[in-house]
Amino acid sequence: MPHNADPRVQQNAMHALYSDNHRWLYTWIRKRLDNQFDAADLTQDTFMRIHSRQEVDKINEPRAYLVTVAKGIISHFYRRKSLEETYSEYVALLPEPVTCSQEQTHIILQTLEQVDTLLNDLPHNVKRVFLMSQIEGKKYQEIADEMGLSLISIKRYMKQAYVQCLTLMEDDFFE
């Protein structure tokens, strides 16, 4: 039986990792967040992410590993928080009859998060051009002038963004 296949070894390693580092990780995350409750949640999310992986017993530098995983979780947390705030600001501007139910809001936020993930795979300028066109409603020439790029570059970037969107839609990204 391979070393990492024994669930007891993994369970013991996870228990030791948690008991030795939970308070330290919570403190580390708490220093980076505005809210102790979010810090507690993200601390748990970090340990849950590690628990779902194999070979916990082979982690050589536990605190460095915890920080690496926590940074990704914190980044995702702030990205989602930013999306929620932007959406809430937008909804607040809508006339009263157009406001959404909690279920609709959840679906919209989930879709926005998926679109954000999709766009994060694109180069920075491609993402920026796509957002300026699709979200801000700017014409290609306006974008070219603002960014100091040629019109053909803007068209090329938009094509790249659309191809990415279509590819992911064909791969059932949004299911």
Image: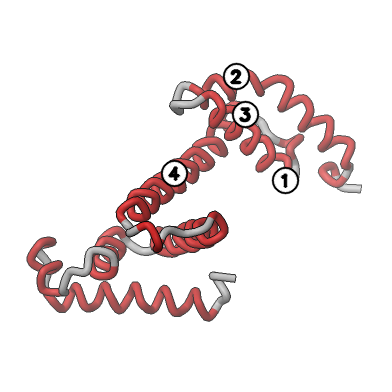
Q: Indicate which disc, 3 or 4, sits on the residue closer to the N terminus.
A: 3
Q: Which residue is mark 2?
A: 24
Q: Which residue is mark 3?
A: 61
Q: CA distance from mark 3 to mark 2?
A: 14 Å
Identify the amino acid type marked 1. Ser
Percent position of residue 165, x then y = 42, 74
Q: CA distance from mark 1 to mark 2?
A: 21 Å
Q: Indicate which disc, 1 or 2, sits on the residue closer to the N terminus.
A: 2
In the depicted structure, whether residue 154 falls above or below residue 50 = below
Q: Which mark is residue 78?
A: none
Identify the amino acid type marked 3. Glu
101 left or right, relative to 57: left
Q: Which residue is mark 1?
A: 52
Percent position of residue 108, x then y = 48, 61
Packing grade of label 2 (10 A; few <14, some 14-19, many >=20) is some
Q: Which mark is residue 81?
A: 4
- Residue located at (40% from left, 58% from top): 120
In the depicted structure, whether residue 76 falls above or below residue 153 = above
Q: Are marks 1 and 2 in contact (CB under 8 Å)?
A: no
User: Considering the numbered disc 4 on the image, is that residue within a helix, a strand or a loop?
Assistant: helix
Identify the amino acid type marked 2. Trp
Percent position of residue 172, x then y = 57, 75
Q: Are marks 3 and 2 in contact (CB under 8 Å)?
A: no
- Res. 145 image quadrant: bottom left
109 left or right, relative to 22: left
Q: CA distance from mark 3 to mark 1?
A: 18 Å
Q: Nearer the viewer, mark 3 or mark 2?
A: 2
Number of marks: 4
User: Considering the numbered disc 2 on the image, is that residue within a helix, a strand or a loop?
Assistant: helix
Q: Are marks 2 and 4 in contact (CB under 8 Å)?
A: no
